[in-house]
Image: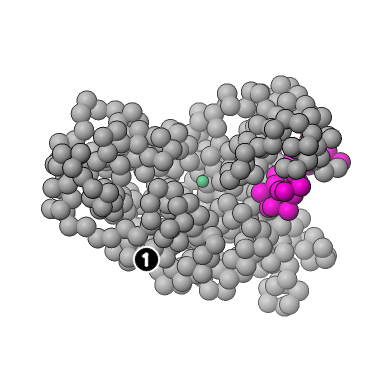
Amino acid sequence: MNKTYERILEDIKAIRIYSTHCHHREDSFYSHMSLDKILSNSYVTFTQPLAARNHDERALFLERNRYNTYLLWLEKAIRELYDIPERITANNWDEISQKITSAYENNSERHLDILRNHCRYNRVVQDAFWKPGSDLGHPDLFAPAYRINMFTYALDENPHDHDNVCLYEQCSRKSPPGDLEEFIVWMEEQITKKVNSGCSALKSALAYGRDLHYQPQDRDHIAKLYRMDKRLLTGKDRHDFSDYVIDAACKIAAKLDIPFQHHTGLGAIDRTNAMQLRELIERNPDTKFVLFHGSYPWLEDVYALVHKYPNTYADLCWLPIISTSASQRMILELLEVGQTHRIHWGCDTWTSEESYGAVLAIEHALANVLSAQVDQGFYTHEDAVFIARRILRDNTKELYRI
Ligand SMILES: [Zn+2]
């Protein structure tokens, strides 16, 4: 790497970060850590099982994943955090794992120490999808987002989302609201309660369960569906209801003046690209739409939306570890077609090691893109550092008021 890259990276590493998105677990989760546990709770095993605990399976697993950016950045993080001089191999696997186990045994707060001191997080917008709105008992570090998927499943016999989060367990009440109007009022009350107790955003991860094309729905039609015998409802009826609930949630977010985070891109991948949200965005000009994950692999959708709609925010969370080169393309194009104050980043991880890997990835992506701009005479060094501060710190601090 050249001198410009090194100088910019050094200044980036002095920034205290505000992350838009994380799935950190409760303290008790981190009492017994190992290399296998970190990998099992990482994106490396998102689409495939972890290698069996034997030499040959592990060697094959590493060979197959070595150049995938999920493993590449996680490995860099583990090597740095545990002072491992060589790459992870089937031969040193158990030794590295033991090092990790001992480090956690010696310090029960290690998972938080990594987030505060290595990741340099001041605040993190936390998505505890298993307990929507939880700050994990650490409100100084975690500013929760309130995931509202479960409300869209209210017409199901046992309403729960793709993560098996049950609506009437999370928001207990004797019986479901009697009609649509009562349901929407009750949903608003639940959301308001969460915002009053510290939630800084709404979050939808519906792209794992349906398309993102939320169409306008007639109130009387939805009210009729709400009153109908649930056994008679069709898939389309439930989809229409889901459209209506998300539109209502947009209006509640606007009223409470909090951003609404939308998972876009990967997931169900059938019409889950960000452009599917266009009509919803147009119908709700007062709602702040945060477009997660760069809509990967449909990055261009985000460019068009941020160019046209001032109430949209491009969030690179997850992207630098999905594909580092895609995140670099996106940083540059967003700076060129959008506005500096509407670009954000978050780690989107479960373990502190993977979170640190995500930090290393965004730092590298920023330094790489910005140094090239400096070397070509487009930006000064000060411009580069200003941009990095906006993306890693100021934009998120301001938008989420954390
Ligand atoms: Zn996430």
182 in the magenta segment: no
- Of 141 and 181, the residue lying toward us: 181
Q: Which residue occupies 55% across, 68% down?
A: 334
Can residue 396 be seen here?
A: yes
Question: Image height check: is 23 above or below 95?
Answer: below
State which region is magenta: 62-85
Say above or below: 214 vs 185. below
Q: Indicate the secondary structure of the residue bearing disc 1.
A: helix
Residue 321 at x, y = what percent? 64, 52
Instruction: Name the residue tied to disc 1.
Output: 278
Dominant secondary structure of the residues highlighted in magenta in the image: helix
Location of residue 242 with respect to 58 vertically, above or below: below
Give the number of callouts. Answer: 1
Asked if residue 150 lies left or right of residue 337, the reply is left
**Can you tell which quarter of the image residue 290 is in?**
bottom left
Please tell me which residue is depicted at 44% across the width and 43% down the height of the picture: 145
Q: Quadrant of the N terminus?
A: bottom right
Q: Is residue 68 magenta?
A: yes
Picture coordinates of residue 221, whole percent (x, y): 15, 53
Residue in view at x 69 percent, y 52 percent = 68
Classify residue 144 as left or right of residue 72: left
- The spot of residue 166 in percent (x, y) is 35, 33
Q: Is residue 182 visible?
A: no
Left or right for 307, reference 287: right
Q: Amino acid at mark 1?
A: Arg
- Which quadrant would residue 349 be assigned to in this image? top right
Q: Sort mark 1 into few (<14), some (14-19) or many (20+) by Cα contacts within 10 Å.
A: some
